[in-house]
Image (cartoon, coloured by chain):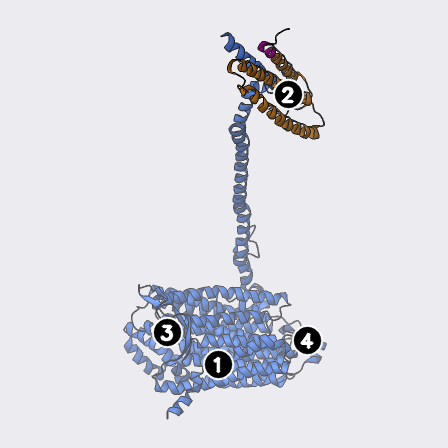
């Protein structure tokens, strides 16, 4: 019996192997990658990720069994103390004056939230690794690419599985580094290395927020472990709206804005498309950019105590959603459309988190991972077929030439547009419904934004599909001649993801449509306690109980909204179809014809990059003034050249002056008067005496004789 | 026959002494200066011997102190001549001259 129990804990007890497997792959690539053949590189790197996926599945299954027997507690496995000590030798003073251990574990935590992330990160990661074998087959730096991918998987899994904020931050920085390395993979291209720098620098701004938020948590709660923090946050010791918790959560959200590309830090993500397409799919669509969502969801116990932060999250999310979607309407680069789509969908996720619908936000992350990874991989397959062409204006009528790519991308488009019964419908509809109902309807304006975004999403996605797969062929003859369907290693992941796009949404089949919303209930242990406590504190315990019933009852409004959002998706589809079905060479954008200024504004991405160049980087001058980092640099340079160096020169000049004076004093006063003066005096005064000294012996003898004679005469005659 | 008294000896000694002194003060050659110093010494010896003879006339033939003194001075003069000639040779080696007026380093 004990033996059986021990056996059933195998994956949980060895959960640390999940991140370490890809780390092993990365290490092998680092040390031996250059000498390995492509097939052995694939075997190692894809192999470790497949193994990690199997371990992840095993862990998730074992966790479910374990949780049923343990009151749905999170499973925690602490390997050792990684930072500081737990012996009380190294402590710091908390905000309330108590002493807390300066300590962070190398520890892992598995609960429903991390299980979900674990499964889709390893699952989608595995598919993208397989896809990359085909996509990167003809590229240089094959081992480097897979080494970076494995390093990314290690960092991402560390981020997900960490049991404290400090270790999460390690993963957080690790994925940022890998993102940088992979965006700049084609480092010979200036644009790629610039994009990599941009991503890295913008992310640093967010990371500064994260680390400051972490310090607030450490000083307020005395621990960085999620379990301790959540326990304290839910204990009732802190009241809702606590300013320190508000500050901490806002700072954490700054971190999330950087990593998850929210306003105003989203600018790096569209440029990140300079990286190879599988990277865009894995890092900049499915996994890394959802790290911010994960972090906010992970800190839900804190966020529910800070209504201001929640409002900020919701508003930033909604604004980002519509802002990015509107830019996506007119972009011509197939990957850029998807990049802005990603930013927009991330906005949806934050909208959901901000209105307190954590489960709906996480659900959208989950479904988005599949359809957006699929869209990017499909785009990669299209680009592969088009011999590297990314501009949709030069595509068209690829439907019959690359049928597998077409069908799978079409499924993903249906999913993201929110056409039932594909995955995106369920998650997006849940977010919109939760936005509509939360705060007694105060967020209906946000619902409106989300609704318009849904319409835009459908439009730009179907625009992409029509311009790429339908309409008239617009490519050159040479490229047309080379069009071919991608190899099986690339189409197989597409098919698997397409199947997931179809079925993933069923996990969250809502009550109103006769389902049971299993996804949200699975996450209840993570989210429900916090919400329940807040409602109880606000004296709305009754509402909580009623809410349970209401959820099952459903109101007619929910059906109406559902109908409306499907309608919006349909309208977007219809509009795109009408505009682009027959797009021939030199077609005109309907928006460009109707409202050229608006079109220009959107095509140029609201001139945000230019604005940032004026204000933050200082690459552009505002009149004669240069602001931002370069302005600061110039000002510092001027200050250094004139003030600091001036002071240095002044000090040098002063030294020289005093040295001159001192030298003059020494030469004329000390030597002249003090030393030579007495000597000269002695020489002058001794002059008469010296006249008697001739140096002639006989003269002395004469003087002596004369003296002697003188003495004799004196004594004789005296 | 003219009796030779002590006064004669003293006059002769004084004459010799004067000759010596004049020689020391006026001659440039070191050898002659040394010889003049010998003259001065011997003038003194002559005085000592003269007074010894005068003393014998009063105290008897055993009063010979002055003559013994003269013998000491002769010894001393020999030693002095040796040292003086040694200096003279060293001086000549350096200067290739034996003139005293060319040695005037002993001044400020």
Quadrant holding the N terminus of chain A? bottom left
Q: Earlier in the sequence, mark 3 or mark 1?
A: 1
Residues A577 and A668: in front is A668
Gap in Å between the C-alphas at discs 1 and 4?
45 Å
Residue assigned mark 1 = A18
Q: Is residue A430 left or right of residue A281?
A: left
Q: Nearer the viewer, mark 1 or mark 4?
A: 1
> Residue drawn at (42%, 89%), measured in percent from left and top?
A7
* Image: A426 above or below A299: below
Instruction: Work out how far the residue at label 4 is from the one at label 2, CA to CA, in angstroms.
Output: 140 Å
- In magenta, the rendered stretch is B1-10
Q: Secondary structure under badge 4?
A: loop
Q: Are there few (<14), some (14-19), or many (20+) residues within 10 Å of tag 3?
A: some
Viewer-nearest of discs 2 and 1: 2
| Residue at which label 3 appears | A438
Chain A palette colour: blue
């Amino acid at each position: 019996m004990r033996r059986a129990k021990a056996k059933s804990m195998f994956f949980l007890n060895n959960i640390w192997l999940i991140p370490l497997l890809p780390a092993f792959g990365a290490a092998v690539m680092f040390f031996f990658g250059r000498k390995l053949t492509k097939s052995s590189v694939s075997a190692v790197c894809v192999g470790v990720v497949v193994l990690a996926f199997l371990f992840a599945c095993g862990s998730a299954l074992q966790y479910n069994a374990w949780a049923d027997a343990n009151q749905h507690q999170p499973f925690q496995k602490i390997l050792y103390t990684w930072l500081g000590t737990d012996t009380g030798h190294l402590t710091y003073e908390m905000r309330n004056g108590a002493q807390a251990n300066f300590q962070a574990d190398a520890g892992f935590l598995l609960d429903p939230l991390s299980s979900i992330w674990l499964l889709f990160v390893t699952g989608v990661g595995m598919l993208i690794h397989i896809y990359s074998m085909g996509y990167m087959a003809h590229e240089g730096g094959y081992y480097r690419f897979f080494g970076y991918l494995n390093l990314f998987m290690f960092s991402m899994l560390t981020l997900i599985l960490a049991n404290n904020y400090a270790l999460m931050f390690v993963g957080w920085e690790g994925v940022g580094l890998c993102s940088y390395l992979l965006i700049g993979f084609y480092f010979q291209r200036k644009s790629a290395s610039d994009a990599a720098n941009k991503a890295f620098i913008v992310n640093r701004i967010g990371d500064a927020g994260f680390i400051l938020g972490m310090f607030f948590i450490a000083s307020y709660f005395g621990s960085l472990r999620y379990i301790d923090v959540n326990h304290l946050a839910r204990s009732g010791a802190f009241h809702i709206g606590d300013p320190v918790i508000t500050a901490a959560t806002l700072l954490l959200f700054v971190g999330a804005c950087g990593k998850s590309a929210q306003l105003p830090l989203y600018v790096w993500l569209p440029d990140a498309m300079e990286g190879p397409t599988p990277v865009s799919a894995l890092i900049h669509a499915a996994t890394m950019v959802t790290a911010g969502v994960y972090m906010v969801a992970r800190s839900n116990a804190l966020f529910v105590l800070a209504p201001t932060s929640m409002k900020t999250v919701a508003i930033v999310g909604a604004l980002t959603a519509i802002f990015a979607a509107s830019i996506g309407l007119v972009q011509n680069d197939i990957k850029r459309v998807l990049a802005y789509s990603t930013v927009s969908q991330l906005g949806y996720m934050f909208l959901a988190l901000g209105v307190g619908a954590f489960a709906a936000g996480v659900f959208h992350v989950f479904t988005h991972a599949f359809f957006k990874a699929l869209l990017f991989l499909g785009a990669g397959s299209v680009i592969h077929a088009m011999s590297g062409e990314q501009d949709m204006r030069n595509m068209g009528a690829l439907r019959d030439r690359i049928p597998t790519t077409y069908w799978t991308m079409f499924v993903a488009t249906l999913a993201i547009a929110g056409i039932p019964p594909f995955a995106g419908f369920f998650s997006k509809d849940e977010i919109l419904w939760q936005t509509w109902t939360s705060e007694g309807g105060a967020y209906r304006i946000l619902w409106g934004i989300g609704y318009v975004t849904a319409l835009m999403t459908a439009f730009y996605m179907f625009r992409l599909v029509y311009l790429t797969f339908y309409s008239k062929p617009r490519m050159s003859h040479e490229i047309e001649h080379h069009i071919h369907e991608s190899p099986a290693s690339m189409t197989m992941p597409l098919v698997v993801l397409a199947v997931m796009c179809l079925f993933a949404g069923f996990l969250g089949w809502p009550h109103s449509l006769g389902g049971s919303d299993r996804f949200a209930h699975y996450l209840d242990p993570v989210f429900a306690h916090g919400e329940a406590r807040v409602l109880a504190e606000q004296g709305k315990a009754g509402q909580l109980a009623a809410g349970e019933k209401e959820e099952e009852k459903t109101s007619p409004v929910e059906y109406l909204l559902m109908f409306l959002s499907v309608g919006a998706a349909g309208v977007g589809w219809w509009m795109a179809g009408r505009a682009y079905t027959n797009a021939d060479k030199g077609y005109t954008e309907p928006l460009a014809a109707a409202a050229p200024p608006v079109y220009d504004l959107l095509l140029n991405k609201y001139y945000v990059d230019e604005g940032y160049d004026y204000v933050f980087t200082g690459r552009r001058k505002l009149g004669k003034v240069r602001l931002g980092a370069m302005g600061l640099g110039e000002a510092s340079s001027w200050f250094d050249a004139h003030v600091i160096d001036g002071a240095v020169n002044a000090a040098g000049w002063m030294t020289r002056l005093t040295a001159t004076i001192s030298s003059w004093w020494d030469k004329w006063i000390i030597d002249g008067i003090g030393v030579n003066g007495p000597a000269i005096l002695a020489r002058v005064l001794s002059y008469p005496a010296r006249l008697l000294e001739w140096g002639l012996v006989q003269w002395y003898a004469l003087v002596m004789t004369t003296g002697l004679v003188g003495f004799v005469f004196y004594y004789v005659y005296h | 026959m003219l009796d030779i008294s002590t006064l004669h000896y003293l006059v002769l000694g004084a004459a010799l002494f004067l000759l010596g002194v004049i020689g020391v003060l006026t001659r440039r050659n070191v050898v002659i200066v040394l010889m003049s110093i010998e003259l001065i010494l011997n003038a003194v010896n002559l005085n000592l011997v003269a007074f010894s003879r005068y003393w014998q006339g009063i105290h008897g033939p055993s009063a010979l102190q002055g003559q013994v003194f003269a013998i000491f001075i002769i010894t001393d003069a020999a030693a002095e001549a040796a040292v003086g000639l040694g200096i003279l040779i060293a001086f000549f080696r350096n200067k290739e001259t034996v003139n005293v007026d060319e040695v005037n380093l002993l001044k400020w």
